[in-house]
Image: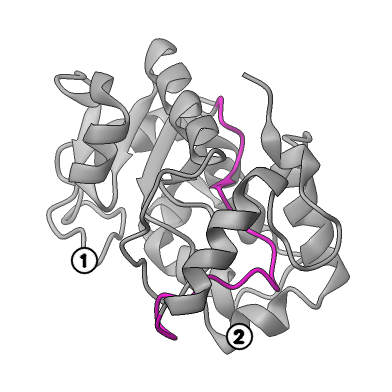
Amino acid sequence: MDNPWVLLPSKPPFLLPQDEQVVRAYNKTASSNHCIHPEIPPEPYLGHPQARVILLNLNPGFSAHDAAFYKDPIALEFNRKNLDHEETDYPFYLLNPMLPQTTAGPKWWSKKLKALISIAGRERVARGLCCIEYFPYHSRRYGRFPVILPSQQYNFYLVNEALSQGAIIVLMRSKRKWLQAVPALRGYERLVELNNPQNPALSPRNCPGGFEEIVNVLLDD
């Protein structure tokens, strides 16, 4: 399946042509918490989709810090390379030390992956993990979007490909949505669930059924 994100405009609004009409119609009635923010680039995934550990999340969040973060040309460059699946030293680019790690997405992910980073190191984690979002665009909170966007099908395809390669799959959030979108997840032997998806940190306590295996995979690379 071709990657639709190579067609994302290089300037805002950052909406794929096949998504734009539906997103604009949704935003006309959406609350401030659920409104989609096309002024910053989407993050349908973070990292290389052929990573051996795949994290399934709901959608990228939004805050004023995110808006400021993406004014940095380096952040925009890394985002674009990520969308295009370009090879980089830190495929999970929000962990790249060239970016400030104290604001926006880098801060959130550094906290959620702290236990793994302390054991395997930042670069190994950035190369060994990929997060795939159920919904690609930023909003403060995920709203009940009326349809499946065309672009979402690519992410579902990536998850199915990861299953065929035997990747460890970690359900961070929205189990029901993911099982509906990718039925092959049901009964998958390497599916890992978190004790507390409201605080989706990958730690020994929150991820007792898979943390050790994830660490072993990262250290083996």
Helix, strand or loop at disc 2? helix
Q: In the image, residue 25 lies at what x, y percent? A: 53, 65
SS label for mark 1: loop
Q: Nearer the viewer, residue 155 or 145?
A: 145
Residue visible at 62% across and 74% down in the picture: 101
Q: Give the residue type at disc 2.
A: His
Which residue is painted at 44% across and 12% down in the image?
165
Residue 74 quadrant: bottom right
Query: Which residue carries the number 1 mark?
Result: 198
Mark 2 lies on residue: 65
Name the residue nearer the viewer: 170 or 25: 25
Circles 2 and 1 in contact, beta carbons < 8 Å:
no
In percent of the image, x 18 and y 49: which residue is there? Answer: 194
Main SS type for the magenta part? loop
User: Three-letter amino acid code at disc 1?
Assistant: Gln
Give the distance between the C-alpha atoms of the residues marked 2 and 1, in whole angstroms. 21 Å
- Locate residue 145, reporting x and y percent: 37, 58
From this viewpoint, is residue 52 visible?
A: no
Callout 1: 10 Å neighbours few (<14), some, many (20+)? few
The image quadrant where one finds the C terminus is top right
Taking the spot 70% from the left edge, 73% from the top edge, the residue there is 39
